[in-house]
Amino acid sequence: MGTLLPQAWDIGPMLLPHISWGEKLFRPLVVYGFLLVAFRFSGKRELGQATLFDFLILLLISNVVQNAMIGEDNSIGGSFAGVAVLLTLSWALNKITTRSPRLRKLLEGSPTLLVHDGKVLDNAMRKESVAINDLLTAFREQGIASVSEVRFAVLELDGKISIIRTDAPIPVSREDCVVEEIRMQAPQ
């Protein structure tokens, strides 16, 4: 009775990388770093509003950087090493940014105040490429008919717009004070 695998079949090339382990581990670090910087500076709205065009761009970017990450290697072991590097890097950055607000702000940015006490902040809207229609949509989703009903509208890091109504209570403690951070951004 014959075996299912041909006798000359060597699984080593399938499992082990064809490039050095150092290169195999270094490539994903470089690509991750580049993409982190590229997406960090592309703006919050682009990350939060995934249109069909954005989805296509993400698919194409992943295909373009694939070769940069794997080099001339399609081995299973090499792909596992690349995934391990990316997951470890993600875990490490989450741990580091949890402990360092300054680094977190540098890597992730900070929320942007778009409306303060019923006044639309045009400079912030332009800087973040937020159309007035997007702001009005966020108002309608919250049942707000007029900008005068808005104490704060904030563009969050994920691209969504949070609304705090004028009738919302003002926080009294630092734990409740997400609003206070936003208030510091407000024009005086």
Image (cartoon, helix red, strand yellow):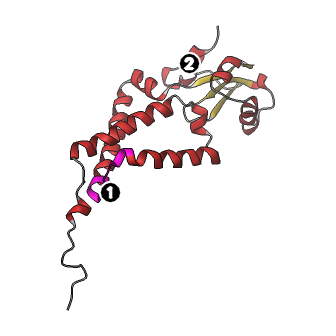
Mark 2–mark 1 Cα distance, whole angstroms, equals 51 Å
**Where does label 1 land, which residue?**
74
Pair 2/1: label in front: 1
Q: Is residue 104 above or below residue 76?
A: above
Figure quadrant of the N terminus: bottom left
75 within the magenta span: yes
> Which residue is depicted at the point 63% across and 45% down?
53
Q: Position of residue 18 (x, y in %)?
A: 24, 53
Q: Look at the image and give the residue range highlighted in magenta.
A: 68-79
- In this picture, residue 11 sits left or right of residue 83: left
Instruction: Count how many numbered circles sit on residues in the image.
Output: 2
Secondary element at image label 1: loop
Query: In the image, which disc is placed on residue 180?
Result: 2
Q: Amino acid at mark 2?
A: Glu
Q: Position of residue 114 (x, y in %)?
A: 66, 23
> N-terminal of the two: label 2 or label 1?
1
- In this picture, residue 52 sits left or right of residue 157: right
Secondary element at image label 2: helix
> Which residue is depicted at the point 71% across and 19% down?
122
Figure quadrant of the C terminus: top right
